[in-house]
Amino acid sequence: GENVEQHPSTLSVQEGDSAVIKCTYSDSASNYFPWYKQELGKRPQLIIDIRSNVGEKKDQRIAVTLNKTAKHFSLHITETQPEDSAVYFCAPQGWTSYGKLTFGQGTILTVHP
Amino acid sequence: GAVVSQHPSRVICKSGTSVKIECRSLDFQATTMFWYRQFPKKSLMLMATSNEGSKATYEQGVEKDKFLINHASLTLSTLTVTSAHPEDSSFYICSARGGSGRSGANVLTFGAGSRLTVL
């Protein structure tokens, strides 16, 4: 099965700074790489995803980069805002097991005003 | 968009009783549903995968006799925690796969979760 490592476990930044979270996976068959944001007591929300035929994808202040050779992908948040404070999870997977998620350990992001 | 309704959102029960959690896809047919458990300040752990009309597939270490999963229709899956104990207290979340997203791929949608407290 997939072995997922996510770093850092906690990240504290000042409002306006950038935040980067890295996810390393083991299964070379993984070809879909989503990032989820979870607020306390709420469901995970998909915030950005990337497929293995693309190296980078950007959506306003968030971006995801993929290094398939090294088997890691990263979440980048620029111009952070207090409402970005949440727990972020990566969940790499293959299309044959789409939906069967192995989540990373999570990163608690705190954005200080 | 695809909507998954999960209830109850919160339930408190006495030790030894059974609790049923429902997960419904409201506007699409969910061919597959997944059940996760999340302890405080921890990640979500997959418990089982359920397909309509067939037995659920449980992850290693998950007791199938304790966590009964039924996927009787394309819109409903239930998780029953039998003979609940305090250590079963957790946040249970379902997700459903089905429908079609913008890219044409299956949509994956999470329920809002159910907070179980066993006294």
Image: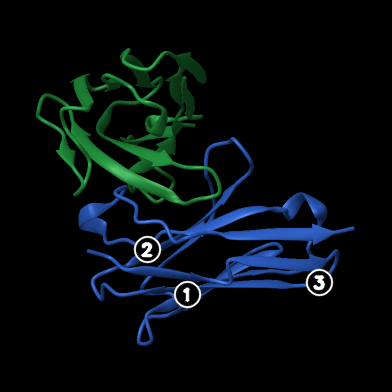
Question: Residue B35 at what x, y percent from top left?
Answer: 32, 36
- Whole-number angstrom distance, CA of label 2 to CA of label 1: 9 Å
Q: Are marks 1 and 3 on the same chain?
A: yes
Q: Which chain is blue?
A: A
Disc 1 packing (10 Å; few <14; some 14–19; many ≥20) = many
Q: Is residue B91 left or right of residue A101?
A: right
Q: Amino acid at mark 3?
A: Asp
* Residue hosting label 2: A92
Q: Is residue A100 left or right of residue B10?
A: left
* Residue hosting label 3: A17
Q: Find residue A9 and name its label.
A: none
Q: Does residue A10 sit above or below B38 in this rendering?
A: below
- Whole-number angstrom distance, CA of label 1 to CA of label 3: 20 Å
Disc 2 packing (10 Å; few <14; some 14–19; many ≥20) = many
Q: Amino acid at mark 1?
A: Phe
- Mark 2 near mark 1, Cβ–Cβ under 8 Å? yes
Q: Which chain is green?
A: B
* Residue hosting label 1: A73
- Whole-number angstrom distance, CA of label 3 to CA of label 2: 26 Å
Residue A21 placement: quadrant: bottom right
Q: Amino acid at mark 2?
A: Pro
Q: Does residue B115 sit above or below A111 in this rendering?
A: above
* Secondary element type, mark 3: loop
